[in-house]
Image (spheres, helix red, strand yellow):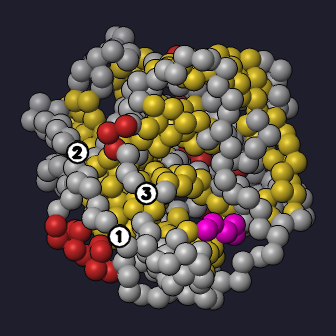
Amino acid sequence: MRPIVAALFWGLAFVAPYAQGTATPTAGDLPAVLREPVDKNPDPRILDIDLEARVTSVEFAPGERIDAWTYNGLLPGPLIRAHVGDRLIVHFTNSLPQPTTVHWHGLRVPANMDGVPEHSQAEVPPGGRFVYDFILPDAGLFWYHPHVQSAAQAGFGLYGALLVEDASDRLPFPERVLVLSDIAIDKPGVFESPDSGGSAGMAFGREGNRLLVNGRERPTFTARAGAPERWRVVNAAKSRYFNLDIGSPFLTIGVDGGLQEYPTKSETLVLAPGERADVIVTPPGAPGTSLVVRALLFDRGYGSIEARIPFDDLFTIRLSEAPAATVAPLPELHRSIEALPVAQATRVSLDLTITQRSDQVFEYGINGVAFAKGHWLHADPGETQIWTLTNKTKWSHPFHLHGFFFQVLDEHEQPVHPLAWKDTVSVPYERTVKVIVRFDTDRPGMWMFHCHVLDHADGGLMGMIEVGGHAHDAASEHKP
Ligand code: C2O
Ligand code: CU
């Protein structure tokens, strides 16, 4: 780690007794630890699991239940934990009343394992099965969710974390995987309709009204005063941006596709839907006290901050009575990442647009064309492209590309440091973001890109790129 970063981080970690002692943990705290699935294969390099999508009553707050859409009866789904290079086999069964698929967000899988109906696999009908089988090529925190009626299905609870570990980046700190999400409850025990608010609700991107951490509202975790922890965090909410505040700095060591070039420090941690962070944080406070981790209001565009409370309490950290830990220096956390060369890259312009079709009907699109009428982009295997993403709307869009990582460039097409591999990047409202991506030679096929505010995706903000195959005459390509 750069000494300056270390100095800043360790200097600040022990001041700011923020919100200390103000938390009153609920007596009926529910356990918020993620469960792991049973591995049916004795080979240590093969993880072979069953995954069943089914409706199950879950208790998400003390005494409050909902019939959630779950994987294996759990909200969120089981934490799949493997090692980089392992083979993952998932025997998937759909016991939902609707067709579904599983998409492995951020994983560089073959196209036919990517879970996109029509382009990578057929929908799995109610009662149907599908076997996902692929190698895990990259270390990092990934996640899985459906790719059929995504806003509704993920909104009802279908998501889970997938942690791919690498022995070379282990740290001597306790580690937590935190799945952040929200659900929209109408009256007790009943989900709000996924199309509430009609086209205007879609244009905004519907947020849930109950915030969950590992499937529980305001859970409590226990930590030791002064002891750093490593948090692997994913934002699995369908529209909400999370802006975490713990009253002590976050040291980000990695993002979507594993460790970044070098650590960076920030006062809060912002995660757009779909994004992940790998952070080191030292919960501030004295032994025996508690603190509340808050989600601060985040401006993701029109209507997102007006008349809303400035923060929500997300979870409580109770510091044990054990004497404060004395902290050893952090190990070096560098990763050498090569900047993708911009010189020969093909330039592609993608405007993120919204069009009013009639009085109350809005349609999102790319270059003014909604997905259902879209034409597909093309890349040759091995080709590098620079995508200029221009947000012409009043809402921010977390832009996600399936199957490939990209790097973020600045407006002059220079790499943004620290270099990092991303699969989801927020394109703030009325702003432009440039990314550079190299399409691997060994994974031809149809790959999707879309906004990860799932209502926006369903509302038309999606597209496809064909890697390999023949070059398309874009104007004549129509989705049936
Ligand atoms: Cu989480 Cu199409 O993606
Ligand atoms: Cu969007």
Some atom of ligand 1 lies within 8 Å of the CB belonging to the residue at label 3: no
Q: Residue 182: x, y in percent?
A: 67, 59
Kindly identify which numbered label has been placed on residue 173.
Answer: 3
What residue did someone put label 2 on? 335
> Which quadrant would the C terminus be assigned to in this image?
top right
Q: Secondary structure at mark 2?
A: loop
Kindly identify which numbered label has been placed on residue 373.
Answer: none
What residue did someone put label 1 on? 327
Count neighbours of disc 3 (C-alpha within 10 A) and say few if under 14, some if 14 to 19, many if 20 or more: few
Q: Residue furthest front?
A: 323
**Camera-nearest residue between 283 and 383:** 283
Residue at the spot x=45%, y=26% of the render?
136
- When the figure is inspected, residue 341 is found, relative to residue 39, above or below; the finding is below
- When the figure is inspected, residue 462 is found, relative to residue 157, above or below; the finding is above
Q: Would residue 301 appear left or right of 379 to someone viewing this image? A: right
- Give the magenta range: 218-222
